[in-house]
Amino acid sequence: AAPVTTAAITNNGWVYPALFKHNEQYILVSEAGGPDYYSGTNLSNNSQGQFKVRFPDQREVITSGGYLPEHTLPLLSPWRILAIGSLKTITESTLGTDLARVNQLKNTDFI
């Protein structure tokens, strides 16, 4: 886990899931339940440990051909989730799967 004041090594920022340590607590940041038309985001930060959600670079194209979310209303976006606690708390958390969309696959024999 990186300290929260650690700068990302690329201009694209931190990708999910991102695990940080602050004092003796861990912070897991991720996204869950995003619709297909919504681009994944990442985190950018400064040296004071302040983070913001960042949309992709223009070179990071999603399957629809765009890099930013675009849809008619109602527009749904992913959950941004934080799990905070000990490593045990983080690894046992079901927050991401609790917020994920229900499986749409009919045939799961290959799993």
Image (cartoon, helix red, strand yellow):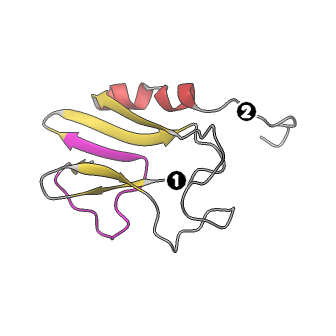
Hey, what amino acid is under mark 2? Asn
- The residue tagged with tag 2: helix, strand or loop? loop
Q: Position of residue 49 (x, y in %)?
A: 17, 50
What's the mark number on residue 40? 1
Snapshot quadrant of residue 11: bottom left
Q: Nearer the viewer, residue 28 or 44?
A: 44
User: Which residue is located at x 28 percent, y 63 percent?
Assistant: 8
Q: Is residue 39 left or right of residue 13?
A: right
Name the residue tied to disc 2.
103
Count residues near mark 1 (Cα–Cα under 10 Å), then give few for <14, some for 14-19, many for 20+. many
Q: Is residue 17 magenta?
A: yes
Hey, what amino acid is under mark 1? Gly
Q: Is residue 32 left or right of residue 111?
A: left
Count residues near mark 2 (Cα–Cα under 10 Å), then give few for <14, some for 14-19, many for 20+. few
In the rendered structure, which disc, 1 or 2, sits on the residue that comes first in sequence?
1
Majority secondary structure of magenta residues: loop
Distance from disc 1 to disc 2, alpha carbons, whole Å, reads 19 Å
* 1 or 2: mark nearer the eye: 1
Which segment did they paint magenta? 5-21
